[in-house]
Amino acid sequence: MNKEWDLTPLYKGIDTPEFRADCAELEKLSAELNAFAAHLPEDNRGAVLHRALELQERMARIIAPLFEYAGLRSAVNTADEEAVNASAKLQKLLSDTSAAEAAIKAYVGRTEDLETLIAADPFLGDYAYLLRTMKDDAKYTLDEKVEEALAKMNLSGGSAWENLQSYLTSTVTADYRGEKKTLSAVRNLAYDPDPAVRKDAYDAEIACYDRIRDGVCFALNSLKQQVTTECEMRRAGSPLEMTLRASRMKKTTLDAMIQAIEESLPIFWKYLRAKAKLLGYEGGLKWWDLFAPVGKNTATYTVEDAKQYLLDHFRPFAPDMADMMERAFDEAWIDFFPRAGKVGGAFCANIACIRQSRVLTNFDGAFGDIVTLAHELGHAYHGMMIEEHRPLNLDYSMPVAETASTFNETVVMNAALAEAKDPQVKLGLLESQLQDTTQIMCDIMSRYWFETAVFDKAKEGFAFPDELCRMMTDAQKRAYGDGLDPETLHPYMWVCKSHYYSAGLSFYNFPYAFGGLFAAGLYAQYRREGEAFLPKYRALLKATTVSSVEDVAKMADIDLGDVNFWRSSLEIFKDRVDQFLALAEQA
């Protein structure tokens, strides 16, 4: 079985006739789109919109494989000069069409009879949701030349700062017990059963950030100031409001979810204190013990073990998903192991143009790595559900992006818990699930509050590393309460988490909580309805690219503005904590 992913279904290389030909075609299409958008006639608007979308479709078909190939190569080797340069060239080509995109959006915005035109043309009907959102967004679109300037400046602004954070965190080494380790490798030691290993790894991790914190600090400040400036230019409200509009999600939904989470935080604090007691001390859990295994959860797994585990647990649930997972392992969709230059964490890239996905993980053999694979392959399944859409209907918003992935985690964990006979095995499984849930509740809330504070600071000045560390620990104290030892927090979580470092994607934190709780609600329906739920689930996933978050939820008879929905989802985790506490008392 492969250990690295295979990108040859996209291209054999950058310096190949195929890659060069597609780049040339992209340049040609860019010029054609610019020429077309420069003179949009005010009459015969239906034909104009039809032609505009056709050109944008052709662009999308060419852009997707080029960007994915260069980006995926960079992800596993941030020092890949050829891939980095190709990405920069592609970003430049894409920025050249920003004025045309703005002109088309403005044209849609001033089309008064849009609904009539949509009804008259099936092609426009396929893009009804896109056109309606373009019309709504047009009020925040600036003059075409300003949009073009912003896009071009972003290449040496937001995009460059994002690349800097990725490069620094993927190339820095930690001094761990006399040897050099990548940041991903030393962070993986947080799952080690030996408490001395975990503590030494934590110390080595914290120490290595001192060498890169200044550069990452400038990246974070510059990005947030850029977003704040653009928000003011567009008269678009706050960065959070911009994110909610881009997410096609109402503020009432976010407020209801956060209210329910805040009410529930003490539940997770109880779990953390109980875990500390299991590890031999009273009070709040120490940071380096957050991922410490307890119970009989110390088994290690090979890649082959992980494959079989996933197939065994998903085939009874959804055979088509199991088939896709088998393909992912057998056809080299997955890049498994950490290595120098490879970015940390995990992600899934859906590549509709080849009807496949690519998954990056930093596999270390723990049970949590199997859960991570289930999560990322949930994204791949989501991608499979939407691949029949037209090329401009392939983007789902941040909140629903985590639905299928977190649903998969729930399937794995609930199946494993149902099979567990030994109380210590069940304790270990509960611990694994609660460990992950605490991350998407407590830790996500700390990230949400931290990013809010950073944006507030960006309005008035620059936050130096010490202040960012203070902001981070303040947010952690608020989110983790007395569940963590306040003397052993992680002040540098702002350095290692890539989610903060995008000019076009602020607040990429609350979607994880949304995904976890929405998936819990959906899983409860699956338990009630059985196989009858699956067609609804597939249809719901397919609709995520052409519907608002609230309308997607309505397909499952869920009102996201009702705080009681979120409370009911959290009740599932309260029950898990109660089970954990009972088993911990017996241990």
Image (cartoon, rainbow, N blue to C red):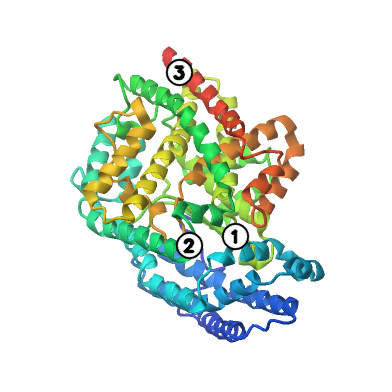
Quarter in which the C terminus is drawn: top left
Indicate left or right for 179 with 111 as reference. left
N-terminal of the pair, mark 2 or mark 1, is 2
* Residue 307 against residue 155 in the figure, above or below: above
To which residue does mark 3 refer? Answer: 581
Residue 64 placed where, x, y %? 56, 69
Residue 321 placed where, x, y %? 65, 47
Report the mark closest to the observer, 2 or 1.
Answer: 2
Per the model, the C-alpha gap separating discs 3 and 1 is 41 Å
Q: Is residue 307 visible?
A: no
Per the model, the C-alpha gap separating discs 2 and 1 is 25 Å
Instruction: Give the residue at the far top of this rendering.
Output: 586
Closest to the observer, 371 or 98: 98
Report helix, strand or loop for mark 1. Answer: loop
Q: Residues within 10 Å of mark 3 (few under 14, many from 20)?
A: some
Q: Are marks 2 and 1 in contact (CB under 8 Å)?
A: no
Find residue 235 and name its label.
Answer: 2
Q: Is residue 486 visible?
A: yes
To which residue does mark 1 refer? Answer: 395
Indicate left or right for 329 with 230 as reference. right
Residue 349 placed where, x, y %? 53, 58
Question: What's the residue at 60%, 29% (across, down)?
Answer: 568
The three-letter code of the residue at mark 2 reads Arg
The three-letter code of the residue at mark 1 reads Asp
The three-letter code of the residue at mark 3 reads Leu
Per the model, the C-alpha gap separating discs 3 and 2 is 50 Å
Report helix, strand or loop for mark 3. Answer: helix
Instruction: Give the residue at the far left of this rendering.
Output: 178
Instruction: Give the residue at the far right of this rendering.
Output: 120
N-terminal of the pair, mark 3 or mark 1, is 1
